[in-house]
């Protein structure tokens, strides 16, 4: 069980952000394709409690891994902070079928390409999320560390997005 603390910023170009990361000495980790299936329960308890349940299938260099994630409600702070519990699962499709039979239904899916970098103790993700656009997510151990990384990337003064990709995608589909 851990705490996820992250800042998300919409950007025009991931290429220019990758160049900036190289310039400040960040370490490139991997490029991943992620397919996320987000669930809601029939009673609406996840939504009521502002929690999330997701199965992510992540492919890196042709190898796929499925991860089950529970996200707790947002906590206070300058950046999005939530409890996050994750575990690898053997079969994402089978787990989706199990959830469906337990009354959980898919309410939105999100597919993206993520380039993962490491800088000053933070994960910096360059995300291409069609049709939402391009984003930079900085996840770190505390708000001060994230703020320093954002400053190094010239993003500290940019507006932060508090909504997750699932909420943005669901809104896009409703509009």
Image (tube, rainbow, N blue to C red):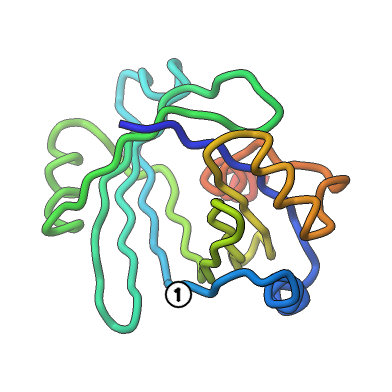
Is 116 located above or below residue 171 in the figure? below
Q: Residue at x 81, y 53 (%)?
A: 155
Which is more toward the observer, 19 or 175? 19
Label 1 neighbour load within 10 Å: few <14, some 14-19, many 20+: few
Is 64 located above or below residue 156 in the figure? below
Most distant residue in the right direction: 157
Is 163 located above or below residue 73 in the figure? below
Number of marks drawn: 1
Query: Residue 63 falls in which quadrant of the image?
Result: bottom left
Asked which secondary structure carries label 1, the reply is strand
Residue 78, image x, y percentages? 71, 28
Residue 29, image x, y percentages? 47, 72
Left or right of 128 in this view: 23: right
Query: Residue 168 falls in which quadrant of the image?
Result: top right
Q: Residue at x 74, y 79 (%)?
A: 19
Which is more toward the observer, 106 or 51? 51
Residue 147, image x, y percentages? 73, 42
Left or right of 94 in this view: 72: right
Q: Pick the quarter of the image with the N terminus.
A: top left
The residue pinned by badge 1 equals 30
Left or right of 36 in this view: 93: left
Q: Residue at x 34, y 44 (%)?
A: 54
Residue 44, image x, y percentages? 38, 21
């Amino acid at each position: 069980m851990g705490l996820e603390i992250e800042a998300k910023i919409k950007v025009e170009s991931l290429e220019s952000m990758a160049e900036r990361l190289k310039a400040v000495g960040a370490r490139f980790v991997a490029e991943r394709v992620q397919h996320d299936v987000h669930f809601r329960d029939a009673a609406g308890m996840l939504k009521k409690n502002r929690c999330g349940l997701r199965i992510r299938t992540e492919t890196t260099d042709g190898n796929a891994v499925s991860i089950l994630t529970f996200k707790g409600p947002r906590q206070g702070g300058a950046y999005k902070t939530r409890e996050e519990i994750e575990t690898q699962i053997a079969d994402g499709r089978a787990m989706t079928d199990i959830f469906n039979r337990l009354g959980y239904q898919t309410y939105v899916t999100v597919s993206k390409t993520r380039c993962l970098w490491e800088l000053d103790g933070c994960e910096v993700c360059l995300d291409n999320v069609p049709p939402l656009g391009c984003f930079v997510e900085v996840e770190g151990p505390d708000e001060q560390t994230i703020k320093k990384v954002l400053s190094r990337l010239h993003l500290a003064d940019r507006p932060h997005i508090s909504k997750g990709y699932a909420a943005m995608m669901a809104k896009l589909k409703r509009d």
